[in-house]
Every structure is written in C-alpha cells, then in structure tokens.
Amino acid sequence: MVREHNRPGRAGGGGFYEYPSEKGARKFLWPQLKPLFEKSDAQWNITDLKDRLLYRQAVETARCLSENVLTTVHDANIGSIFGIGFPAWTGGAMQFIYGMGIETFEERAAQLAQQYGNGFTLTDEVKAAIRKYQPQY
C-alpha cells in the first residue's frame, strides 16, 4: 500500500481509509480497495475463516502461558479479550480452548497448521501448558 499506491496510513492521510478534512466528517474506505484487491472468483470457507482468526490468537495466548509471559488463565482470558480483541462471548482465548476440549482444539489446530502454516502449530511446550493450567472445578 505504501510503495505501490502511496497510501502511508492515517498520519499520511491514506492507508485503507480516506480521512476527510471537514470537521466532523467520518472516515470511509478508500474507494480503490475493491478494484485493486477484490478476487471475485475466490472461494471462501467461512468455518476456516472463523477458525483461523480464533485459533491463531488462542495459540499465541497459550504460547504466552508456556513461556511465562502470562502466569494465570484468568490473565490470559482477560488479556486476550481486552488486549488483542478476542471475542468476549468465548470467555477469552484459554476458555475458548477449554470450552471445546483440549483434544478437539489440538486436532483442529493441527488441521489448520497443515492447511495454512506453522502459525497454528502447537509445540509440546504449549500443549503441556494448556494442560498444566486447565482449571479444575
């Protein structure tokens, strides 16, 4: 966007949005986004799209637990909701994992890793942390 279309971002008055100079006017999407980037023949699997957004963030949250960046499930859940915008309806990234079941999460993450790349890979350390921090009721 910066090099090819001279759209440096908000500070430069560009990026994905147009920023009108009139006071109180609302920003709006740059009209050239669609003609430049639309792939009208692309086929989308909505389940994969949802899972890619949720699982990628959950994997990173679990990794933070495994590396002691986070030290409690509570902090991981609250941090994921307020810090990275994880959907509140899930209860947070770790609750998302525990709510579906660890094995189910691991299986789907492995499928996503095979299809979309290593960002969905769960290392042995991350798997161990997910189990270590699992709440017991």
Image (cartoon, grey):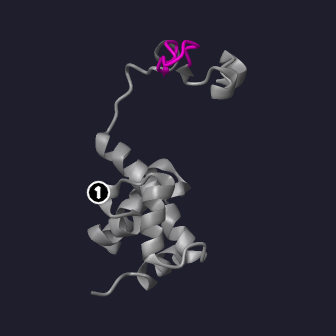
Q: Residue at x 49, y 19 (%)?
A: 24
Residue 105, position as x, y percentages in the image? 35, 66
Residue 16, position as x, y percentages in the image? 55, 24
- Residue bearing mark 1: 89
Q: Residue at x 59, y 13 (%)?
A: 21
Q: Residue at x 41, y 57 (%)?
A: 55
Q: Quadrant of residue 109?
A: bottom left
- The front one of 22 and 2 is 22
What quarter of the picture does the N terminus occupy? Answer: top right
- The front one of 95 and 83 is 83
Looking at numbered disc 1 in the image, what kind of residue is underneath it?
Answer: Trp
Q: Quadrant of residue 4?
A: top right
In this view, 16 is above or below 133? above
Side of 124 where 92 appears, left or right: left
Q: Residue at x 29, y 57 (%)?
A: 89
Query: What is the chief secondary structure element of the magenta stretch?
Result: loop
- The front one of 85 and 108 is 85
SS label for mark 1: helix
> Is any atom of residue 42 visible in this view?
yes
The residue stretch that appears in magenta: 19-33
Name the outermost residue toward the front. Answer: 23
Residue 97, position as x, y percentages in the image? 36, 68
